[in-house]
Amino acid sequence: MAHRVTSHADYTTQLDAAGHKLVVVFFDAPWSGTCKGLTPSINEMAGEFQNDAVFLLVDIDDRSEIARTFFVKDLPYVAFVKNKESVGHLQGRHVTQTSIHDDITKHK
């Protein structure tokens, strides 16, 4: 299951703990129906890729400071981070279960 980030310190701790694993950061908001629809898929993939990736859920309203670091302009937004560096992202209509899965496979 994906980890819900509770603070900027929690986010930093999760990145540190990930080590060399891929970190999949799913930015969402409680008012976004599309995000709500994708969250179960994110949790499924967290189980599927548990040995290869860490999955984080970030509410853009509660953790706007994290969203700003990725220049999130449209939801849903998925950032792929490896070794604390951004290696890619998906946003808006390009965020599907298949596209997320493909990018995880590409970047892991």
Image: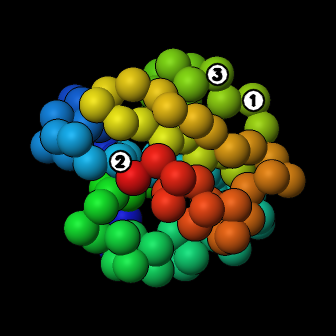
In the picture, residue 90 is in which quadrant?
Answer: top right
Point out which mark residue 53 bears: none
Indicate whether 38 appears above or below 83: below
Tag 3's secondary structure? Answer: loop
Distance CA(mark 3)–CA(mark 1): 6 Å
Amino acid under disc 2: Leu
Of 16 and 64, nearer the camera is 16
State whether residue 27 appears in this view: no
Other-residue count near label 1 (Cα within 10 Å), few / some / many at <14 / 14–19 / ≥20? few
Indicate whether 66 appears above or below 96: above
Query: Which residue, given by chain and number where applicable, does mark 3 sit on?
Result: 71
Query: Which residue, given by chain and number where applicable, does mark 2 sit on?
Result: 22
Query: Which residue, given by chain and number where applicable, does mark 1 sit on?
Result: 73
Tag 1's secondary structure? Answer: loop
Identity of the residue furthest to the right in this view: 93
Label located before the other in sequence (2 or 1): 2
Residue located at (56% from left, 25% from top): 70
